[in-house]
Structures are given as structure tokens and as C-alpha cells.
DNA sequence: CGTGTGACGCGGG
DNA sequence: CCCCGCGCCACAC
């Protein structure tokens, strides 16, 4: 028998929001936390992403930091995330930053 | 219990 | 634009 994982309301909202990010668009950890009604929860969003991406099949690569840069370090995911985003048409400028226009906001 | 640790964010220099 | 410091907060030990 498989146990059903209990997730907090915040976690379930975060999962719902991330799942809704369209192809070719991105959201920041902080923005996701804000829409999930926990403005201070950016770091929690990061942790949720780290632990639930596989189980919930989340488009984890569509989440970057507020500056529009990938937070993963080279050698541990950075290249993979960048390739996935580039494959969806997301553009990185010379300083490895994604322009504001690629950011997406839920319609509520 | 206290202490350290980030897939963060923001303001300053 | 880069680099720091500080605030934040769930979690591992």
C-alpha cells in the first residue's frame, strides 16, 4: 500500500503554480511564493522544487531568481536548465540574464 | 533544545 | 554589473 503524502496548503499551491508556467516563460522563486500567499517563502519554494520536481513532474527549469539568472551552479544543473530553457526559446543576454518579458504572472 | 545551511531577495557600495 | 551583508525560514544534526 502506498502512503499518501500530506502537503501543506502552501506547498500544494506552489506545485499548482509551477505546473501552470507556460512553455518558454519563467517565474522567480519569490514571485511564486507571493502567489502562493507567503511573500517570505522564496527559499521554501526552492526546497519544494528540489524535493518535489520528480514526483509531481514539475517544469522546474522554468524557475529562476528575481534577477532573471539561473541559481543552480555550473556542474550541478546549471547547464541542463539553461539548455532546457534555450530549447523553449528563452533568450539569455551577455551576462547570462533572462529579460523581463519572459517572466510570466498567473492571472489569479 | 541550539546551530548551520541553502535551487532566495533586496539594498548598498 | 559584480560583490557583500543581512533578513528570512524550514530542515537536518
Image: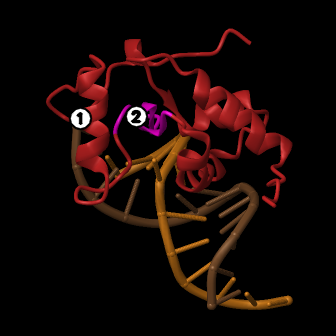
Chain colours: A red, B orange, C brown
Secondary structure type for disc 2: loop
Tell me the residue at 46%/19% (across/down). A103
Query: Which of disc 1 and disc 2 is earlier in sequence?
Result: 2
Asked if labels 1 and 2 touch by Cβ distance under 8 angstroms, the answer is no
Would you say A86 lies left or right of A71 here?
A: left
The chain to which mark 2 is attached is A
Residue C2, given in percent of the width and then of the height, sits at 22, 49
- Range of residues picked out in magenta: A59-69
Using the image, tell me which numbered label, if any, was put on residue A83.
Answer: 1
Q: Which residue is mark 2?
A: A67
Magenta stretch: residue A15 in it? no
Would you say A58 lies left or right of C13 here?
A: left
Residue A51, given in percent of the width and then of the height, sits at 58, 56
Tell me the residue at 22%/26% (across/down). A92
Tell me the residue at 28%/48% (across/down). A78
Does label 1 lie on the same chain as label 2? yes
Would you say A105 lies left or right of C9 here?
A: left
Amino acid at each position: 500500500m502506498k502512503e499518501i503524502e500530506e502537503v501543506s496548503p502552501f506547498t500544494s499551491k506552489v506545485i499548482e503554480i509551477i505546473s501552470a508556467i507556460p512553455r518558454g516563460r519563467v517565474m522567480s522563486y519569490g514571485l511564486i511564493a507571493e502567489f502562493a500567499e507567503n511573500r517570505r517563502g522564496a527559499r521554501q519554494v526552492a526546497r519544494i522544487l528540489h524535493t518535489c520536481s520528480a514526483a509531481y513532474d514539475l517544469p522546474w527549469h522554468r524557475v529562476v531568481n528575481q534577477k532573471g539568472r539561473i541559481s543552480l551552479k555550473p556542474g550541478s544543473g546549471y547547464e541542463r536548465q539553461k539548455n532546457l530553457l534555450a530549447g523553449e526559446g528563452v533568450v539569455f543576454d551577455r551576462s547570462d540574464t533572462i529579460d523581463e518579458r519572459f517572466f510570466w504572472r498567473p492571472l489569479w
